[in-house]
Amino acid sequence: MRGRLIFPFLAEVYRLDTAAMAGPGPGPHASGYDADFREPVLADMDDDGLAEVFRREFSPVRVPCQVEPEAFESLRMAPSGNSPRTSLELVFHFRDLERLGLVDAATGDALIRPSDRLSSLYDVTGTLVQAVRTPPGLYVTEARPTGFGLHRRRPRRNLLLVTFNDRPQARGVS
């Protein structure tokens, strides 16, 4: 017995495709993915003087989850005006991740990782509950396995706690 999610929803997640960004990057960049900072590079791809994120993603996947909201567009004032803060935790069950092919068979690591993006939440019938505006978007900042040892005869982990946070909307010039 591995337990189950309480009041499940479906999270639509876009996983970052670092392999698709590993080739020639935009402009002067050798790659579209910065290995040091582990994030997509910024480049002015439309010659408007503002840098855009060079981001490539896998097709979206809908994963059953339990929603634990912390803050949703809470007021955070900046010198230039309101910069709302959103932080959301989703709890995924490893049984669902395994069924959807989101666990690396060789290492046992969950394939939902930092920099993946939450697109929206749906109820179990597929009806949209909450779309996430991008920008700023909600991105994985932590994916932590939890719930170890809940089965007496064969202890296993059963949950993945994933924290999604918004990102600042500042844009730079490349």
Image (cartoon, grey):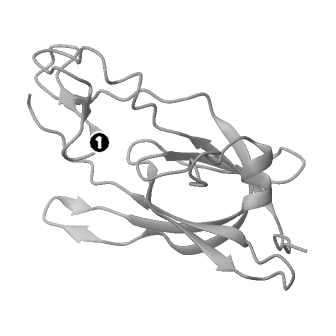
Q: Nearer the viewer, residue 119 or 141?
A: 141
The picture places residue 27, in percent across and down from the top left corner, at 14, 14
On the rendered structure, is 132 left or right of 76?
right
Query: Can residue 128 be seen?
Result: no
On the rendered structure, is 105 left or right of 24?
right
Q: Residue shown at 63%/34% (left/top)?
A: 60
Element type where label 1 sits in the image: strand
Image quadrant containing the C terminus = top left
Query: Can residue 30 be seen?
Result: yes
Instruction: State whether residue 52 is above or below residue 71.
Output: above
Q: Residue shown at 10%/23% (left/top)?
A: 49
- Tag 1 residue: 39
Instruction: Answer few, some or many: residues within 10 Å of disc 1's Cα (few below 14, many 20 plus, some between 14 and 19).
Output: some
The picture places residue 146, in percent across and down from the top left corner, at 62, 75
On the rendered structure, is 112 left or right of 26?
right
Instruction: State whether residue 22 is above or below residue 100.
Output: above
Q: Quadrant of residue 48?
A: top left
Image quadrant containing the N terminus = bottom right
Q: Residue shown at 46%/37% (left/top)?
A: 16
Furthest residue in direction bottom, as rendered = 152
The picture places residue 11, in percent across and down from the top left corner, at 68, 51
The picture places residue 122, in percent across and down from the top left corner, at 76, 50
